[in-house]
Image: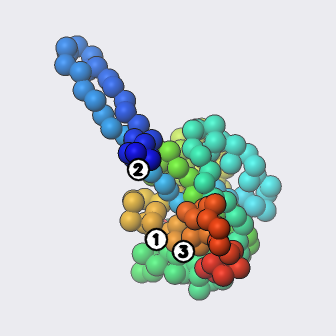
Amino acid sequence: MKKVAALFGALLFVSSVDAGSTSSKETVIQEEETFAIPAKPEIVEKGQIGEILSRIEKAGFKIKALKMVRLTKEQAAEFYREHKNKPFFDSLCTYMSKGRVVVAILSGPDAIKRYRTLEGATDPKKAAKGTLRGDFGTDREANAVHGSDSPESAKREIRFFFSEFETLANAGQKHSAPQKNFAR
Ligand code: UDP
Ligand code: MG
């Protein structure tokens, strides 16, 4: 029974009626998690972490895990490995390791796509006003925030930064021991 209730809670049912048609349809929007960097180094430096987290919460996302870390250049290269042949790769890794960043797990219906929309275009100059990059980004490299682009990258990126203990997957279990479970 508990399992059924949990499954039901994980799905959001939205009913809608097509304009100009009599047929009604039911869309099931999946509750999902995404990985975000709500503050790349320049945002931490400028003291805009709170403003961005507030925008994220106001947009309806739940913050499921949150911490500040400082990457080495090698760790940044591993995180962004899909870009290793791009001309901007070396500069990107230097930038992402030059200061602390804030990393988070966000959840909500259709969170991956909706957070990418909230982020705005990669280049802040092309990002719409009201998006995080449009309002807080500096240039194509220092573009304020990051968000996973697919369920596969969300899974990989969450695991890259967060241990099971930190994701609270085992919250409430008797013998959860943080010092043994920290991944990095
Ligand atoms: N980036 C850059 N120069 C570019 C494109 C991207 O420095 O021409 C940086 C930027 O910080 C971006 C990250 O590399 O967020 C990853 O690039 P991607 O194309 O995956 O963009 P995103 O998914 O972050 O919008
Ligand atoms: Mg990307």
Amino acid type assigned to the residue bearing label 3 in the image: Phe
**Left or right of 157: which side holds 26?**
left
Provide residue 121's location: percent of width, then percent of height: 49, 51
Q: Is residue 158 visible?
A: yes
Q: Is residue 81 left or right of residue 25?
A: right
Residue 160: which disc? 3
Q: Mark 2 is on which residue type?
A: Lys
The residue that appears at 41% across and 50% down in the rendered structure is 3
Task: Kindly identify which residue carries mark 1.
Answer: 156
Considering only order in the chain, which callout, 1 or 2, is on the residue closer to the N terminus?
2
Judging depth in this view, the residue of 87 and 95 nearest the camera is 95
Question: Which disc, if any, is residue 41?
Answer: none
Position in image of residue 27 (x %, y %)? 30, 34
- CA gap, disc 3 and disc 1: 6 Å
Between circles 2 and 1, the one closer to the viewer is: 2
Point out the tag, 2 or 3, that comes first from the N-terminus.
2
Residue drawn 45% across the image and 51% down it: 32
In this orientation, which residue lies closer to the viewer: 42 or 180? 180
Callout 3 touching callout 1 (CB < 8 Å) = yes
